[in-house]
């Protein structure tokens, strides 16, 4: 009984790669830090696209501090390739570039429409007799009305008594 608990302490839970490949996982396993047993689908996708020996070769060629990024790139490419076997990531990038182009065009149209409306508003306000160019977008109703030739009853209207 004592030996079974001590052997459980020395053994580690196999990484997703070793579990899928049905091999014994050691603490020096190259896959252990990047394919934890909690995410077996990651290694399954990468294994299906690249193969275990190619993954091992790629990880050995990459510096240790860059391996996590390399694994995430492989996982992304593998899942994209499984969804779209012909184009993979390139298909996703093309769709996103098309969306950016369409949105940029819509933005340019909106900016042009905004500029046209501002120009139109400026023309309307400058042609108005109630517009003071020194105070943009402001109407000076009281000062212009007090200088007008309107009768006094229109300047200060009193409520009608019925």
Image: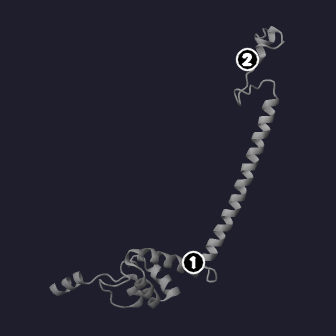
Using the rendered view, name the quadrant where residue 35 is placed: bottom left
Position in image of residue 9 (x %, y %): 22, 81
The extreme front residue here reads 134
- The picture places residue 97, in percent across and down from the top left corner, at 65, 67
- In depth, the one of 35 and 134 nearer the eye is 134
Q: Which mark is residue 44?
A: none
Q: Can you give x and y, in whole percent of width and height, for residue 113 in the image? A: 76, 48
Counting residues from the start of the chain, the first of labels 1 and 2 encountered is 1
Disc 1, SS: helix
Task: Tell me if residue 85 comes above or below residue 107 in the rendering.
Answer: below
Image-quadrant location for residue 143: top right
Tell me, what colour scheme is on the image?
one colour
Residue matched to label 2? 142
Task: Tell me: residue 140, above or below residue 53.
Answer: above
Residue 1, visible in the rendered structure: no
- Residue 10 position in % (x across, y down): 23, 83
* Label placed on residue 80: 1
Q: Is residue 161 above or below residue 117?
A: above
Q: Nearer the viewer, mark 1 or mark 2?
A: 2
For image coordinates 74% across by 45% down, the residue present is: 115
């Amino acid at each position: 009984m004592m030996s079974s608990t001590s052997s459980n302490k020395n053994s580690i839970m196999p990484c997703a790669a070793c579990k899928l490949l049905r091999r014994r996982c050691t603490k020096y396993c190259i896959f252990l830090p990047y394919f934890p047993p909690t995410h077996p689908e990651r290694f399954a996708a990468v294994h299906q696209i690249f193969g275990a020996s190619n993954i091992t070769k790629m990880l050995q060629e990459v510096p240790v501090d860059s391996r996590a990024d390399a694994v995430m790139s492989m996982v992304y490419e593998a899942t994209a390739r499984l969804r779209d076997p012909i184009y993979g990531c390139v298909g996703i990038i093309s769709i996103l570039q098309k969306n950016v182009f369409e949105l940029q065009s819509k933005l340019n149209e909106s900016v042009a429409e905004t500029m046209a409306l501002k120009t139109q508003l400026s023309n309307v306000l400058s042609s108005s007799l109630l517009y003071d160019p020194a105070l943009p977008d402001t109407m000076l109703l009281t000062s212009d009305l007090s200088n007008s030739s309107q009768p006094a009853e229109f300047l200060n209207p009193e409520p009608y008594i019925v």
